[in-house]
């Protein structure tokens, strides 16, 4: 049976080495490099599936930790799976819950078996492990599932990172064994190893020897300086097979999306665009614009003159500022719509630049316009 997740390489940018590709999934094809909007609790906050399709979101992400705690994966399985539950018929990627346990829950205890923790919602005792993470994601029916891993904090001791990656490799093996349908749901392994080249090599060697349908690069975007993240990518991406998708977790600022694409990354996700939208911060072609600022009180121009999205075609900065100041939910919807459209459009332009063998020129032009000098 053909593997459900298949990477199709289309071309490599002659100028940058970035690659254009397609990821084939049971719910459709994803053009890469791509940005994945995050729908943590089975919704991309304030957006309808129709609006996400309108802005050409190709795939969305949902979080196992949150859905496990509420409403519970059994409810979603009884609903016929996450696609049916949230009325989204394009691809869905679910993470495996490990990262949220460490960033959200208290009283957690990690062991070889898995992680015991208390729900951040009501303090209930909970347990996640490779086997439980696979059972939950199989119930959700996501097209791409993530292996259960540990994302070490930053900074972390070399010995801790080494012990942690070795356990993550053993957990990856348990995920493969526990995965009910290894061929019709894509299980991605997550490469760890912190900021150490030898440990990244060890983690990549362990995981690529198990032949997963795709590989994520974890342990980054955890507070390290951006140049360090790029350095880790420089020596980690080449360790991954060229015929499989590469997913950089938790990365979504415009500059990092471009720099990651240049280094051969195919998929990105980040809560940034939706999170900052909710306090009135927007990404525009001229850089960040905090539309709630007083100087936009009587600015009747569009949020971004270079943008053709629903928000920029129909509403002014003054109106958006008013809604955000008045805490009107319509304001959150309009800024979210624009920010997501902006990043999805950015990735469309990145793909076009790869097609035209000019991604480095595109980066320089974008950084200049966006106000990102050599950072
Ligand atoms: C599900 N496993 C898993 N998720 C992650 C999510 C992340 N989100 C960020 N920055 C926002 N870094 C991340 C790393 C990992 C990681 O190493 N593993
Ligand atoms: Zn717009």
Image (cartoon, rainbow, N blue to C red):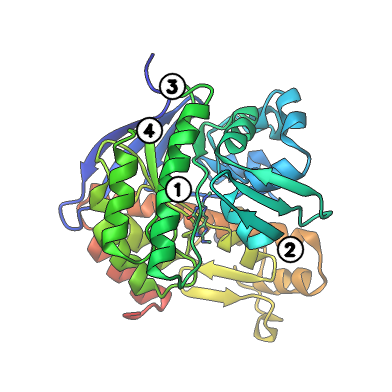
- Horizontal placement of 306 versus 62: left or right? left
What's the mark number on residue 331?
Answer: 2
Q: Where is the C terminus found, in terms of image quarters?
A: bottom left
Q: Position of residue 44 (x, y in %)?
A: 65, 48
Q: Position of residue 297 (x, y in %)?
A: 71, 81
The residue singled out by tag 1 in the image is: 168
Numbered disc 2: secondary structure: helix
Within 10 Å of disc 2 (Cα), the crowding (few <14, some 14-19, many 20+) is many
Q: Is the residue at mark 3 in contact range of ligand 1, meaning its CB lies under 8 Å from it?
A: no
In this orientation, which residue lies closer to the viewer: 230 or 147? Answer: 147
Label 3 – label 2 distance at C-alpha:
43 Å
Q: Where is the N terminus found, in terms of image quarters?
A: top left
Whether pointer 4 and pointer 3 mark residues with C-beta atoms closer than 8 Å, the reply is no
Of the residues tagged 4 and 2, which is closer to the observer? 4
For marks 3 and 2, the one nearer the N-term is 3
For marks 2 and 1, the one nearer the N-term is 1
Residue ID at (31%, 63%): 232
Question: In the rendered image of this protein, does residue 165 appear above or below residue 182?
Answer: below
- Residue lying farthest to the left in this orientation: 14
Of the residues tagged 4 and 1, which is closer to the observer? 1
Question: In the rendered image of this protein, does residue 120 appear above or below residue 138?
Answer: below
What's the mark number on residue 213?
Answer: 4
- Residue lying farthest to the top in this orientation: 1
């Amino acid at each position: 049976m053909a593997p459900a997740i298949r990477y199709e390489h289309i071309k490599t940018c002659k100028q940058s080495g970035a690659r254009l590709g397609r990821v084939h999934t049971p719910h459709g094809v994803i053009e890469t490099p791509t940005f994945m909007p995050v729908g943590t609790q089975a919704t991309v906050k304030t957006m309808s599936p129709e609006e996400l399709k309108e802005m050409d979101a190709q795939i969305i992400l949902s979080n196992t930790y949150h859905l496990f705690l509420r409403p519970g994966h059994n409810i979603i399985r009884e609903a016929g799976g996450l696609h049916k539950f949230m009325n989204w018929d394009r691809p869905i990627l679910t993470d495996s819950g490990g990262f949220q346990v460490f960033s959200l829950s208290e009283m957690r205890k990690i062991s070889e078996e898995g992680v015991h923790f208390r729900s951040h919602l009501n303090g209930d005792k909970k347990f996640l492990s490779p086997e439980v993470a696979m059972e939950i994601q199989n119930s959700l029916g996501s097209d791409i599932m993530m292996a259960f891993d540990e994302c070490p904090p930053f900074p972390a001791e070399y010995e801790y990172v080494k012990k942690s990656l070795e356990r993550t490799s053993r957990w990856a093996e348990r995920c493969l064994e526990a995965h009910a349908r290894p061929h019709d749901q894509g299980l991605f392994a997550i490469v760890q190893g912190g900021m150490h080249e030898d440990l990244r090599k060890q983690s990549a060697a362990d995981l690529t020897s198990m032949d997963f349908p795709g590989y994520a690069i974890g342990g980054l975007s955890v507070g390290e300086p951006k140049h360090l993240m790029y350095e880790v990518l420089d020596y980690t991406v080449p360790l991954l097979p060229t015929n499989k998708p590469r997913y950089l977790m938790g990365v979504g600022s415009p500059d990092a999306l471009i720099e990651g694409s240049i280094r051969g990354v195919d998929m990105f996700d980040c809560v940034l665009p939706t999170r900052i939208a909710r306090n009135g911060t927007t990404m525009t072609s001229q850089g960040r614009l905090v539309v709630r600022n007083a100087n936009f009180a009587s600015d009747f121009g569009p949020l971004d003159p270079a943008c053709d999205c629903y928000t920029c075609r129909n509403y002014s900065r003054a109106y958006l500022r008013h809604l955000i100041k008045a805490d009107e939910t319509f304001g959150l919807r309009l800024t979210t719509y624009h920010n997501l459209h902006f990043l999805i459009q950015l990735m469309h332009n990145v793909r076009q630049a790869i097609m035209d063998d000019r991604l480095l020129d595109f980066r320089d032009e974008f950084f200049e316009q966006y106000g990102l000098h050599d950072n």
